[in-house]
Image (spheres, grey):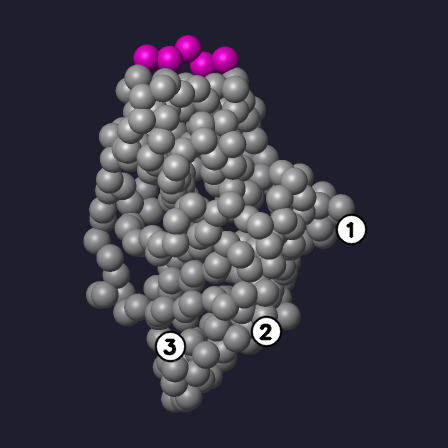
Amino acid sequence: MFEKDVVHNSPLGQETAYANQYDPALLYPIERKLNWLERGIQRETLPFKGVDVWNAYEISWLDSQGKPLVRIGEFRIPATSTHIIESKSFKLYLNSFNLTQFASEKEVVARMQQDLSKAAGGQVQVKLFKLNEAAAIERLQGECIDDLPLKVLHYTPAPECLITSDRVTEESLVSHLLKSNCPVTGQPDWASIQIRYKGPSIDHTGLLAYLISYREKGDFHEQCVENIFMDIWQRCKPQKLTVYARYLRRGGLDINPYRSSIASEPSNPRLSRQ
């Protein structure tokens, strides 16, 4: 099945009945290799490691007495898992807990870990937080390049904008101008992005132009970030590279893909637009 068929057969963009009884069959996985094959890379030889950090703000279920409990959830899906999980199906799955009784929070976490790991084809980490335990507003660390003067010529991905000098540097750069579109509904997906690298110095203006060039790109968050990583990795040839995008929430969920050439776990900062 071609990628466009997989996407258009998903719940995204379709009228869907919202279930309020626990149903793991609502999860809709999409193979990551569909994007990897387009880049000519294999799962066994991926040049990056990473994780997709999902935050969910609309989690609720009933305790054994029928009393509702509410939580904020953090889900970490490894970038090396075989599948991403389509976002609307993730939301429908979480909604299915709403009128279902569970004996304990531990049981809810165990069910989520089991269901999501099966759908993703990799071990998914699940953490639930009471609302008074939620993280405060933070900022991505690094130099913001958004105020650089720039004539924008591209609104579809233009990796040719990425240029380097002979000088070797190590720096962290941040932009809040990343925008792409949902590949099914066309709705805008807004994000802040942090790029940390060591290697030939990347021209800041060219990097900003490149990030802005995603403005009319229709793709999933995870694939956009992987493509940004791969373009910088292949064209700029850094010794080390980490790309972390923090997307705005939609439908009570935000997705925050992290891709890195080094083995590391990202923090989960809640930004001002999240």
- Name the one closer to the observer, 188 or 153: 153
Q: What is the spatial separation of the Cα atoms under label 2 and label 1, in whole angstroms?
A: 25 Å
**In the figure, is residue 134 to the left or right of 12?**
left
**At 50% across and 68% down in the image, what residue appears?**
123
Q: Pick whichever of labels 3 and 1 is earlier in the sequence.
A: 1
**In the figure, is residue 179 to the left or right of 40?**
left
Q: Which residue is mark 3?
A: 68
Find residue 167 and report its horizontal and vertical position in percent.
31, 21
Question: Which three-letter amino acid code belongs to the residue tagged 2?
Answer: Asp
Task: Please report the bounds of the magenta region as a residue range.
Answer: 149-153
Q: Which residue is mark 1?
A: 1
Secondary element under disc 1, as helix, strand or loop, is loop
> What's the mark number on residue 115?
none
**At 28% across and 33% down in the image, what residue appears?**
170
Tell us which disc is closer to us: 3 or 2: 2
Determine whether 203 is above or below 260 in the image. above
Q: Is residue 150 magenta?
A: yes
Task: In the displayed orientation, state which residue is furthest to the top.
Answer: 151
Find residue 183 and report its horizontal and vertical position in percent.
61, 40
Question: Which three-letter amino acid code belongs to the residue tagged 1?
Answer: Met
Q: Quadrant of residue 20?
A: bottom right
Contact? badges 3 and 2 (CB < 8 Å): no
- Name the one closer to the observer, 234 or 91: 234
